[in-house]
Amino acid sequence: MYTTERPLSRPAADIPLSSSANGLEHHHLEDLPPALDPMLLQIAQHAYRTFYEVHPDYPQKPVGVVINQISLRAQLVFKDKPVLLIQECLIPLSQIEA
């Protein structure tokens, strides 16, 4: 059986992104938005639209959509800080509605 292992977290590092009049600004990798696969974004948008077509009067707004990157199963999430498995990613609502 062939498997590929993925790191559990990204290493923290300072990366200069822009310079200002006061000097160089640094940002941590955790602060940067992840590069989003367009296919995952389409899956998230489809799940979001389908949910609101079926439940147009649902009182609570989701935080985003969690997608399993292996099975491509999508689930809306309503908790602020969902616990994700290694193969899952969270597409925040701000990216889905953009």
Image: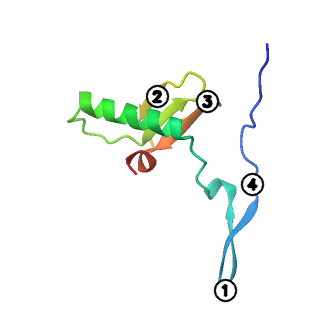
Which residue is at the far bottom? 21
- Residue type (three-letter) at the residue carrying disc 3: Leu
For the residues marked 3 and 2, what is the alpha-carbon distance in whole angstroms? 13 Å
For the residues marked 1 and 4, what is the alpha-carbon distance in whole angstroms? 24 Å
How far across and how far down the image is residue 24, in percent? Answer: 71, 77
- Vertical order, 91 against 2 (above or below): below
- Vertical order, 12 against 56 (above or below): below
Few, some or many residues within 10 Å of mark 2 (<14, 14–19, 20+): many
- Vertical order, 42 against 16 (above or below): above
- Residue type (three-letter) at the residue carrying disc 4: Ala
For the residues marked 1 and 2, what is the alpha-carbon distance in whole angstroms? 44 Å
Q: Is residue 81 in view?
A: no
- Secondary structure, mark 3, is loop
Q: Which residue is the site of mark 4?
A: 12
**On the picture, is 80 further left or further right than 30?**
left
Residue under the point 59% across and 29% down = 69
Q: Which residue is the site of mark 3?
A: 85
- Secondary structure, mark 2, is strand
Nearest to N terminus: mark 1 or mark 2: 1
Residue under the point 32% across and 42% down = 61
**On the picture, is 6 further left or further right than 76?**
right
For the residue pair 68 and 79, the one nearer the viewer reads as: 68
- Whether pointer 3 and pointer 1 mark residues with C-beta atoms closer than 8 Å, the reply is no
For the residues marked 3 and 1, what is the alpha-carbon distance in whole angstroms? 41 Å
- Residue type (three-letter) at the residue carrying disc 2: Ala
Residue under the point 52% across and 36% down = 40
